[in-house]
Amino acid sequence: MKRVIYVVAPTSSGKTTSALNLSQEMNLPLVHADSAYHIIRDQLEINEDAGQLTDYRRWNDPQSFGLASWAGHAHLDDLKPSAYRKLLEGINGDLIIEGFTLSFISERNIIRDLVGDHKSIIIRIRTTFQQWTRFYIKRNKDESVLNRRKDFERLTNCFEPDSSSAIFTVPHPEMVTKKLIACDEGKSSMKDVFLVSGTSFPSSFGLGESQDNFSSVGKNSGNLAFFSAIGNQLTAFESVAKWKMSAEEIDSFGDIGVIPAANNFGAHSDYNGLSEKFAKLKCKLVMIGLGAQSNIDGRIPEVPEGTIRWIKEIAARRPNPPAPNISVRGPVSQKILDHYGFEGQTVVLGCPSLFTNPDPDLGQKIAANVRPIKRVAVPAGHERWRHLSKLEASLTRIVSATGGSYVGQSALNMFRLTRGEARLMDEADLRACRDYACPEMDLEEFTRWSERHGNLFFDVQSWMEHYRRFDFVIGARIHGVMLALQAGIPGVVVAHDSRTLELCQTMMVPYVLAKDVQQGITREQLPDLFKFDAKAFDENRRALAKRYVAFLESNELTPVSWLKDIASPA
């Protein structure tokens, strides 16, 4: 049967662009309903914008008014069939038609009368007042829309459903194509899944200011490792809602929000503002990879009440009670969360970045790449980690001796240094980095060294490709080393706190305790530090993948097929 796909939404919501993208993706003709009004306006020589012809009074009571009243212009309704007939001329098969007025049954009935019996699919773009105003201001350069909430409410409330149409609602224009594909595959009940994060996808980065990019990656580019991993591991993942958005905006993204977590549970962060916002959410939530920040001994930290309330709000929004909806990095994090009342509400899974590489036998690949160490890469530490300064200086000497790479992650000074901005930094900040990393150099020599060896990445694939040039990676950054392992390159983590230690132990990542090498490491020691059992690594990775898949599925999330392959017995 012939299909007519209606894309409907309020004005200034992106429906035209999304309908055009859908038309190109499906190779179907596209008709714009607004064109019918232009035809009628020109035919009657009405000197008025076509978008202003409809009677705004009907918005208050669409069931009574429909499209029968046309702002005082007589006989306009009588001309609509002929206008649409002209637009549809020559189209005999499936088609896409978009427009605000298609929200009304009376308008869609005109199309049905002209096209004949057909399968009617309505894709309705849901939007919030904030999204609507942003789009309107961007397009029209007119901020008066900020005071037009009543107009917005009328626009969004005048949709008329009908029993003969398949109706799908999407929170953003870019989801229109995915939703229609889901419809074609019979997945009308599929949940809209989205990420809720303070981190952005790499497409939003570029040649902007370092401060802006630093904020976009959550103040640590290592966050991209698990953020990108989660996005790649969910089949129904749609888009990203930012923490800074209102509760209403976050809810508009869909049914289940997935939160890629870091070491968010500890004395260092108070998420009271987020707890208040999350208390207003209607969507379900799943948090993946939560870590508790503590010292190397895993002592119970004093966690702010706001942070505890935030986690409680997340736990209360589990998609499938009583199944836990929070995964944690390791047993220490779980113990600390248990202490604060979350016993039985978490699952230990390590970090999703362990499954960046889809190869079920990754450990064997890593072992096969053990070779003489000629070039070394080091994920840079934090210039305020003064207790690790001798160790860091020994690692940078190895970088110098091997023509290696010094890869920045955090904090901002190291971020800028490894991005090639040493000459733009304040002298005090540059000196702090120098004193930490290369204390034997003067500032000019250190600047040239950073320009030669410094590197910074805003996407995981480029980062991993960079590591393929090296024989070994070592440093105090768990995700900086993890990406090397995922690229098949041997690496060792210098574990200096509970979060890095528990991740290494949970995922069987090679590590050395910082206290055991605090005075420094030589190049000759590197092979002995790499204690790695490929068979045990793969077996443990398989077991974690199996638990991860079970966790996702118990929370109504669909993992990609290759994640299931990792979880399958060899």
Image: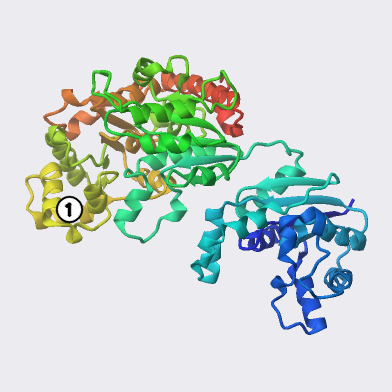
Q: Is residue 357 visible?
A: no
To which residue does mark 1 refer?
Answer: 449
Q: Is residue 296 above or below residue 365?
A: above
Give residue 481's position: percent from left, percent from top. 33, 35
The quarter of the rendered structure image containing the C terminus is top right
- How is the protein colored in the picture? rainbow
Q: Residues within 10 Å of mark 1 (few under 14, many from 20)?
A: some
Viewer-nearest residue: 491 or 16: 16
Instruction: Compare residues 393 and 250 and report the one nearer the observer.
Output: 250
Residue 293 placement (x, y as % from top left): 30, 27
Q: Amino acid at mark 1?
A: Trp
Provide the secondary structure element on which disc 1 rests.
Answer: helix
When asked about the image quadrant of residue 328, the answer is: top left
Q: Is residue 56 above or below residue 182?
A: below
Q: Position of residue 408 (x, y in %)?
A: 27, 46
Relative to residue 384, is residue 99 depicted above or below?
Answer: below
- Front residue of 291/375: it is 291
Instruction: Point out residue 374 in the picture as x, y percentages from the top left corner.
Output: 26, 40
